[in-house]
Image: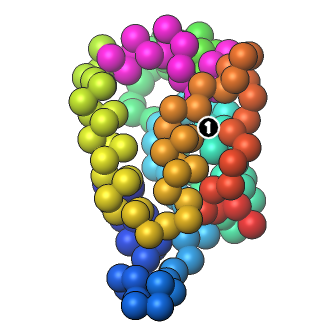
């Protein structure tokens, strides 16, 4: 859903005969609503991976955990540190086997990836950022899995 919404900000109108384009600006603020126990992962790993600013004027995380007793909360927090934060900390873009298998178990397929690429290609066809966003989808963090994606993105200052 986000990809469809965000694409509308890329193009104001179709190309004119003189090949000039008018672009809207990309949203400058993002609010993520998720589990509170995942806040640290988003703020410390996911945002830096896509180079989204953590500045409160640009980002807000609204966290709400499901009801759980102390024992369940301890279990959830340990799981997040091992399989959530811990996994992403070692594999910033989720390209390694552990996170790839986790996605696959949740129904992610190559057809879904191809569909996402096709959607970006179609909806961002007039954007100067299209190729960079497509490249970000396949960026694996380089040899260490920790190298940040360096090409220009729509939300870069």
User: In the rendering, at what x and y percent does residue 17 appear?
Assistant: 40, 90
Left or right placement of residue 51 versus residue 125 in this view: right
User: In the rendering, at what x and y percent does residue 24 appear?
Assistant: 51, 80
Q: Is residue 105 above or below residue 92?
A: above
Q: For the N terminus, which image quadrant? A: bottom left
Residue name at image x 40 percent, y 63 percent? 125
Question: 93 or 47, which lies in front?
Answer: 93
Residue 96 part of the magenta-drawn span = yes
* Image quarter of residue 100: top left
| Residue 70 visible in the current orientation | no
- According to the picture, the residue beneath numbered tag 1 turns out to be 46
Q: Magenta part of the protein: which range?
A: 90-104
User: In the rendering, at what x and y percent does residue 148 appear?
Assistant: 73, 35
* Mark 1 surroundings within 10 Å by alpha-carbon count, few (fewer than 14), some (14 through 19), many (20 or more): some
User: In the rendering, at what x and y percent does residue 90 appear?
Assistant: 68, 15
Left or right placement of residue 134 versus residue 90 in this view: left
Residue name at image x 43 percent, y 77 percent? 11
Residue name at image x 36 percent, y 44 percent? 117
What is the chief secondary structure element of the magenta stretch? helix
């Amino acid at each position: 859903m986000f990809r469809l919404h965000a694409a509308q900000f890329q193009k104001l109108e179709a190309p004119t005969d003189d090949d000039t384009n008018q672009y809207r600006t990309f949203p400058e603020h993002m609010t993520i609503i998720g589990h509170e126990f995942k806040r640290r992962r988003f703020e410390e790993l996911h945002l830096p991976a896509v180079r989204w600013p953590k500045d409160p004027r640009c980002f807000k995380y609204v966290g709400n955990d499901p009801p759980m007793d102390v024992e369940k909360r301890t279990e959830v927090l340990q799981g997040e540190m091992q399989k959530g934060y811990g996994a992403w900390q070692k594999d910033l873009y989720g390209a390694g086997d552990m996170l790839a298998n986790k996605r696959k178990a949740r129904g992610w397929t190559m057809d879904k990836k191809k569909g996402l690429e096709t959607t970006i290609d179609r909806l961002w066809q007039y954007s100067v950022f299209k190729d960079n966003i497509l490249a970000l989808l396949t960026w694996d963090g380089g040899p260490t899995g920790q190298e940040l994606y360096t090409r220009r993105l729509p939300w870069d200052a």
